[in-house]
Amino acid sequence: MKRSIRIIAVALVAVMLCLTLVACGKKLSGTYEAEIGGDILGYTATYEFSGSKVTATKTASVLGAKESTTFEGTYEIKDDEITLDFDKDDNDIKGGTFAFEETEDGIKIGLVEYKKK
């Protein structure tokens, strides 16, 4: 009797461990890029995902010279939403919760589609 209780207990622990791993949110890997805005006031936004970390880079062209700003942070995907939390943000690259969708060529965050590089 004690032996069967031990076997059942071990099996329950194994099942709980599997369920815990399945409950973890989806993770992204790789670099995604989008051109946002026009030629005059536009910029390129690049998101690089690794584990639960994200690095966003905003590259703008100012009078022919390229100027880049980098933002470090974390992300979490739950259901059809992504939550980005950056160490700092500006008017273009912001933290918060946005609609999220995977597409054939990349991902869509909010209304912007980012192509996988």
Image (cartoon, rainbow, N blue to C red):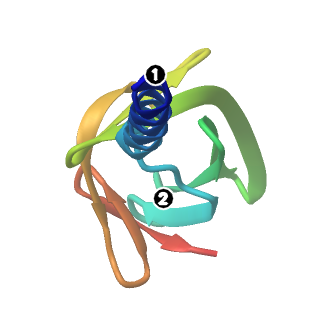
Q: Which of 84/15 is in front? A: 15
| Residue 96 lies in quadrant | top left
Q: Residues within 10 Å of mark 2 (few under 14, many from 20)?
A: few
Let me know if residue 93 appears in the view.
no
**Is disc 1 placed on a helix, strand or loop?**
helix
Check the picture and name the quadrant holding the C terminus.
bottom right
Residue identifier under label 1? 2
**Is disc 2 placed on a helix, strand or loop?**
loop
Let me know if residue 47 appears in the view.
yes
| Residue 67 lies in quadrant | top right
Circle nearer the N terminus (1, 2): 1
Q: Residues within 10 Å of mark 1 (few under 14, many from 20)?
A: few
Determine whether 94 is above or below 115 in the image.
Answer: above
Residue identifier under label 2? 40
Tag 1: residue type?
Lys
Task: Give how far across and how far down residue 65 sits, in percent.
Answer: 79, 54
Check the picture and name the quadrant holding the N terminus.
top left
Q: Residue at x 65, y 30 (%)?
A: 71
Q: Which of 95/93 is in front? A: 95
Tag 2: residue type?
Ile
Compared across the picture, whether 92 is left or right of 67 comes to left
